[in-house]
């Protein structure tokens, strides 16, 4: 295997942080190489330098043995380096071919382009119709648009940033087939992920980053996921243990809930029913955008529903707003940390007041007790190991993971009877994610009912008693999580609603 | 090459330092402007900033003017700042100011020539109520039909001006005024006048109300749940809804408060410095107050200082016009410069200036 890209001593410093410190590694031709690391380990900075979005402060890169220092992404693409980003940049109102054309320097005629898109999509087993409007495509199909956009440039090196985070297990299989085909044709792939099992299944080599430095290289085929994770984190992993407490009486009951969100791009909830008992963790899986936000807003009280749709301890709470629900013990932590769960420019103390004034009695006669609020913020920071200079820091100054710990901590420490969380560990490093999961399980063990909405199936399998999946606004009937196979979960997420019927 | 790097959080020092720096910078640049026009820059700056307050010859007249001009500006700007903080853009304070003055004056004149202690307080209440009602039009249209409050409140200014003109010429016209437009002079009717409370200061009840509103707004914004909800809504509407803020009620509260305070300012003006309802009663306080609100960074204390500063440049500018023969356009350029520099310096609060070596491409 000849060497395609060699990176020597790359260093990139931002004010106050050295994002990459003397990073060296190499990728062979036709190699699938994994870049592993926690959030903030420097993976993004590294690939941005390779793709010409950032310039290194020190260090050199070589492509095909000759010096490579892209000034911008155009130069990188010209040299044969392409990248599929985690977040898509597609226009929903345009069709596939038009979207692809927009990303090209000299787009060919539409008809020729459509033909070559068809050809590439057939060659690589990525079914995609160039005439379809992107707005109608699933996340997996949108990713194919991005991949095909890259493949049309015939890249030598394809960089993929967390490609499977938006895919169902079946879609992941299709993607992997494509990547293996590309590999067999000699294309190298730099694969960024923190899903270790995927890396073990796909990659030939792995470079592990921690705090901007290379801390190890390994062959993922022969290294266990656990030891890779420990290299990433730099410590022994603490796996949450399910206490397995008895579940109690019914806390929350949702029956035949229909809900159309005010936002025209939202997902309608259709005939959603679920039951949550004290001490139970109900895991809700599904690909993002299938009604997760809407389900949370209906349970938190941000959105009001028809009479009798949401029952709490036998009482109809459908008409209650968020604060009235907090009063009786229904709390929620939304997915979007900045701008929904927390106000970016406000201090942590103020953000503590955002949801906790009622249950923590932080106000008297509608006058806020800032001293008490600050004490509560400190309590969260301490109990959840939030890394910040202090409660006076603005929410936006915290890293995503630390803010997530703060948001979850704020709700958990209010001792809710029901806690609804969406993506509790999204963007959180492995050890912090384990801590958050443990805190959620402890809360359930104390008798609270939890609804955990997540796209991370491993996480759901680890903490759920029951599992259900959201698919285009429809919720499958919850089933005991124990014993569910990956195939069954995939079918639940993919919308095979007759599965229950077939089992009868 | 100079680049700006975003700070992780707004700098507290620069929040205070930028206005001072901006005033100094304006003095320097303004001085250059005046020098280029052949005037003595030091004398011009002194005439604008110093003489109105401390020159023995003029201060007797112009010092009280400072509070007379600043009072309504501050009172209106405080009301506007609540809405602006929450992202509710009431541009129509001028109309609310006019309607407050009209309603209050109408109540008083309806009781003429009755003389009782409660007439002036009743007029104050009526003035606030008039402004409040005028602001309820955009508020209810926004909450019921989701109309744009910027357009509606602005358009209602012109409606209010027409009502003012018809009142001055018609139903409020002084019956003993020999047919001249304009109402009776309220400041000369003891039961309805708003006199200077302490001789030589210019302080009338409106100035007292302005100072009271600064204190009240400070407490509301910093200590009260409602103030927290206002700030939260401005920062992040979605987080505010999550925190249980009733956004429609907030629209009504913010517009209503701004309307009531503007109406108060109008009432105090018509019963005091202006004296009567006249066609040209609307002197633009309602629009200038928008500038005051932003100049003061929507902070009550800042608004107090900004109102005083702006009033000073108006008075000083007039003084410079007839003392030094500076054209009024030059004074306006100078005032505009102050605003632009203040707003431009804002970048220092959120960004750090870094000098980096130009990279060789």
Image (spheres, rainbow, N blue to C red):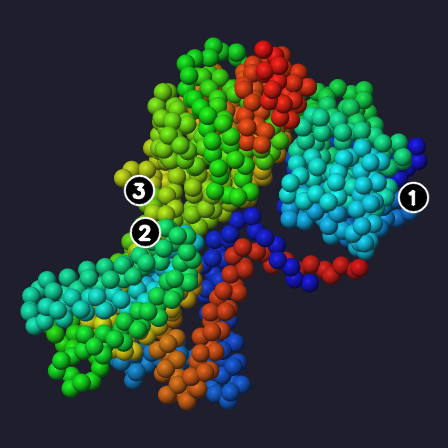
Name the disc covering residue A103, or none. Answer: none
Q: Which residue is at 38% across, 27% downward?
A: A308
Query: Of marks 3 and 1, which one's residue comes earlier in the chain?
Result: 1
Is residue A82 at least partly visible in the picture?
no
Q: Residue at x 18, y 78 (%)?
A: B173
- Describe residue B269's horizontal placement relative to residue A466 as left or right: left
Q: The N terminus of chain B appears in which quarter of the rendering?
A: bottom right
Q: Is residue B251 left or right of residue A421?
A: left
Q: Is residue A38 above or below residue B192?
A: above
Q: CA distance from mark 2 to mark 1?
A: 68 Å
Left or right of A216: which side holds A65? right
Disc sitting over residue A65 in the figure = 1
Classify residue B331 by image quadrant: bottom left
Badges 2 and 3, same chain = no
Query: Secondary structure under badge 1?
Result: loop
**Residue contact between numbered discs 2 and 3, judged by CB atoms under 8 Å:** no
Q: Is label 2 in a helix, a strand or a loop?
A: helix
Q: How many marks?
A: 3
Decide: marks 3, 1 in contact (CB < 8 A)?
A: no
Q: Please, which chain is the residue tagged with disc 3 on?
A: A
Mark nearest the camera among 2 and 1 is 2
Which residue has dot 3 on it?
Answer: A367
**Residue A218: horizontal and vertical position, in percent?**
80, 26
Circle 1 packing at 10 Å, graded few (<14), some (14-19), many (20+), is few
Give the CA distance from mark 2 to mark 3.
17 Å
Q: Chain of mark 1?
A: A
């Amino acid at each position: 295997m000849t060497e395609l890209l060699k990176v020597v001593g790359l260093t990139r410093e931002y004010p106050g942080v050295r994002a990459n410190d003397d990073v060296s590694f190499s990728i062979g031709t036709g190699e699938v190489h994994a870049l592993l690391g926690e959030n903030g380990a420097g993976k993004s900075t590294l690939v941005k330098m390779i793709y010409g979005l950032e310039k290194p402060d020190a260090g050199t890169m070589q492509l095909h043995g000759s010096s490579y220092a892209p000034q911008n992404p155009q130069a990188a693409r010209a040299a044969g380096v392409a990248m599929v980003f985690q977040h898509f940049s597609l226009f929903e109102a345009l069709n596939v071919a038009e979207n692809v054309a927009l990303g090209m320097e000299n787009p060919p005629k539409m008809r020729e382009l459509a033909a070559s898109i068809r050809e590439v999509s057939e060659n690589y087993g990525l079914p995609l119709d160039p005439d379809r409007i992107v707005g109608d495509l699933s996340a997996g199909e949108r990713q194919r648009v991005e991949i095909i956009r890259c493949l049309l440039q015939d890249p030598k090196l394809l960089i993929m940033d967390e490609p499977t985070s938006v895919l169902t297990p079946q879609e992941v299989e299709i993607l992997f087939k494509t990547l293996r085909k590309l590999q067999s044709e000699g294309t190298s792939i730099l694969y960024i992920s923190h899903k270790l099992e995927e890396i073990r299944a796909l990659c030939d080599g792995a470079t592990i980053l921690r705090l901007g430095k290379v801390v190890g290289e390994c062959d993922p085929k022969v290294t266990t996921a656990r030891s890779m994770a420990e290299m990433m984190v730099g410590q022994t992993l603490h796996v949450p243990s399910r206490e397995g407490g008895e579940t109690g009486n019914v806390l929350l009951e949702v029956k035949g809930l229909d809900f159309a969100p005010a936002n025209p791009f939202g997902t309608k909830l259709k005939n959603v029913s679920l039951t949550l008992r004290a001490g139970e963790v109900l895991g809700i899986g599904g690909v993002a955008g299938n009604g997760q936000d809407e389900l949370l807003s209906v349970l938190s009280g941000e959105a009001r529903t028809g009479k009798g749709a949401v029952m709490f301890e036998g009482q109809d709470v459908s008409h209650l707003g968020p604060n009235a629900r907090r009063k009786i013990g229904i709390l929620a932590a939304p997915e979007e940390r900045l701008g929904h769960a927390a106000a970016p420019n406000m201090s942590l103390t103020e953000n503590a007041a955002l949801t906790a004034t009622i249950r923590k009695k932080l106000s008297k006669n509608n006058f806020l007790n800032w001293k008490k609020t600050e004490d509560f913020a400190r309590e969260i920071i301490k109990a959840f190991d939030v890394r910040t200079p202090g409660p006076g820091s603005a929410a936006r100054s915290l890293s995503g993971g630390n803010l997530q710990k703060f948001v979850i901590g704020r709700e958990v420490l209010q001792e809710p009877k029901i806690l609804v969380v969406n993506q509790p560990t999204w963007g959180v490093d492995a050890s912090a994610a384990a801590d958050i999961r443990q805190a959620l399980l402890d809360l359930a063990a104390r008798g609270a009912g939890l609804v955990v909405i997540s796209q991370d199936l491993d996480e759901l399998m680890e903490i759920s008693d029951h599992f259900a999946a959201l698919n285009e606004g429809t919720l499958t009937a919850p089933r005991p999580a124990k014993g569910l196979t990956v195939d069954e979960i995939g079918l639940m997420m993919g919308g095979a609603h007759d599965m229950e019927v077939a089992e009868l | 090459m100079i680049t700006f790097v975003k700070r992780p959080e707004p700098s507290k020092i620069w929040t205070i330092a930028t206005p001072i720096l901006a005033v100094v910078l304006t003095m320097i640049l303004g001085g250059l402007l005046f020098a280029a026009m052949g005037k003595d820059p030091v004398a011009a700056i002194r005439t604008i900033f110093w003489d109105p307050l401390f020159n023995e010859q003029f201060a007797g007249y112009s010092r009280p003017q400072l509070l007379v001009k600043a009072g309504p500006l501050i009172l209106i700007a405080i009301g506007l700042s609540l809405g602006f903080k929450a992202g509710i853009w009431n541009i129509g304070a001028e109309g609310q100011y006019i309607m407050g003055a009209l309603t209050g004056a109408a109540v008083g004149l309806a009781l003429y020539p009755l003389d009782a202690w409660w007439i002036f307080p009743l007029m104050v209440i009526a003035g606030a109520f008039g402004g409040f009602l005028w602001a309820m039009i955009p508020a209810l249209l926004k909450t019921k039909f989701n109309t744009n409050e910027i357009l509606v409140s602005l358009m209602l200014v012109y409606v209010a001006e027409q009502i003012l003109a018809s009142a001055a010429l018609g139903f409020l016209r002084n019956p003993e005024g020999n047919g001249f437009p304009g109402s009776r002079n309220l400041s000369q009717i003891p039961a309805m006048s708003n006199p200077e409370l302490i001789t030589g200061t210019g302080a009338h009840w409106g100035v007292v109300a302005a100072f009271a509103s600064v204190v009240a707004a400070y407490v509301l914004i910093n200590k009260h749940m409602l103030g927290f909800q206002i700030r939260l809504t401005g920062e992040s509407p979605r987080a505010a809804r999550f925190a249980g803020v009733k956004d429609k009620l907030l629209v009504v509260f913010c517009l209503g408060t701004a309307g009531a305070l503007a109406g108060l300012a109008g009432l105090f003006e018509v019963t005091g410095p202006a004296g009567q309802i006249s066609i040209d009663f609307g002197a633009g306080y309602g629009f200038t107050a928008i500038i005051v609100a932003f100049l003061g960074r929507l902070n009550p204390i800042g608004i107090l200082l900004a109102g005083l500063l702006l009033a000073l440049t108006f008075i000083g500018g007039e003084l410079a016009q007839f003392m030094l023969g500076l054209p009024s356009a030059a004074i306006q350029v100078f005032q505009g410069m102050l605003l632009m520099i203040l707003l431009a310096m804002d970048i220092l609060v959120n960004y750090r200036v870094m000098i980096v070596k130009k990279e060789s491409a």
